Amino acid sequence: MSAFRQKFASQMQIPENRFNDRFDIVEAKRTVDNLDKGIYADALGYLTGQGEDQRCLKMETLSQFNVGLGKEKFTDDDGVYKDYDSIYFPIYMPRAMSKEMHSRLDKR
């Protein structure tokens, strides 16, 4: 198991107020921009590495789907909140891609 996966293997809880925070488009863009900065090397290595416990994704794929990297607070085994590297898989599509997807579906 990779070191990145081991960090998240224990059960973690999301801070109660996290869902009350607004994750706006500016913050989402910032996490996507972090892909090119190399500051979350463990997370990026997990996504792009070619090992058995890695995802083997290309940087082009991560960029195409607006995958982002950042930090989130989770509790450790002692109930203390700590920052952990996090991978953000968006639950939205850019408008241009969304329109293209709709036109493909309409043709079927």
Image (cartoon, rainbow, N blue to C red):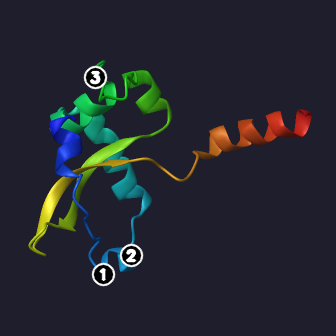
Residue 93, x across and y down, in percent: 58, 46
Residue sitting nearer the eye, 2 or 31: 2
Question: Could you tell me if the residues under marks 1 and 2 are in contact, i.e. CB atoms within 8 Å?
Answer: yes
For the residue carrying disc 3, how many other residues have a C-alpha within 10 Å: few (<14), some (14-19), or many (20+)? some
For the residue carrying disc 2, how many other residues have a C-alpha within 10 Å: few (<14), some (14-19), or many (20+)? few
**Is there any visible trace of residue 36 in the rendered image?**
no
Query: Which one is earlier in the sequence, the residue at label 3 or at label 1?
Result: 1
Residue sitting nearer the eye, 95 or 46: 46
Circle 3: element type: loop
Residue sitting nearer the eye, 19 or 10: 10
Query: Compared with residue 90, is residue 12 higher up or lower down, i.e. above or below?
Result: below
Give the residue displayed 8% in from the left and 73% down from the top. 78
Distance between mark 3 and mark 1 Cα atoms: 33 Å
The residue pinned by badge 3 equals 49
Residue 71, x across and y down, in percent: 21, 55
- Quadrant for residue 25, please give it: bottom left
Query: Compared with residue 92, is residue 38 higher up or lower down, i.e. above or below?
Result: above
Q: How many marks?
A: 3
Res. 30 mark? none
Query: Compared with residue 55, is residue 66 higher up or lower down, i.e. above or below?
Result: below
Question: Could you tell me if the residues under marks 3 and 1 are in contact, i.e. CB atoms within 8 Å?
Answer: no
The residue pinned by badge 1 equals 16
Residue 24, x across and y down, in percent: 41, 63
Residue type (three-letter) at the residue carrying disc 1: Glu
Residue type (three-letter) at the residue carrying disc 2: Phe
For the residue carrying disc 1, how many other residues have a C-alpha within 10 Å: few (<14), some (14-19), or many (20+)? few
Question: Could you tell me if the residues under marks 2 and 3 are in contact, i.e. CB atoms within 8 Å?
Answer: no
Give the residue displayed 40% in from the left and 21% down from the top. 58
Side (left or right) of 11 relative to 77: right
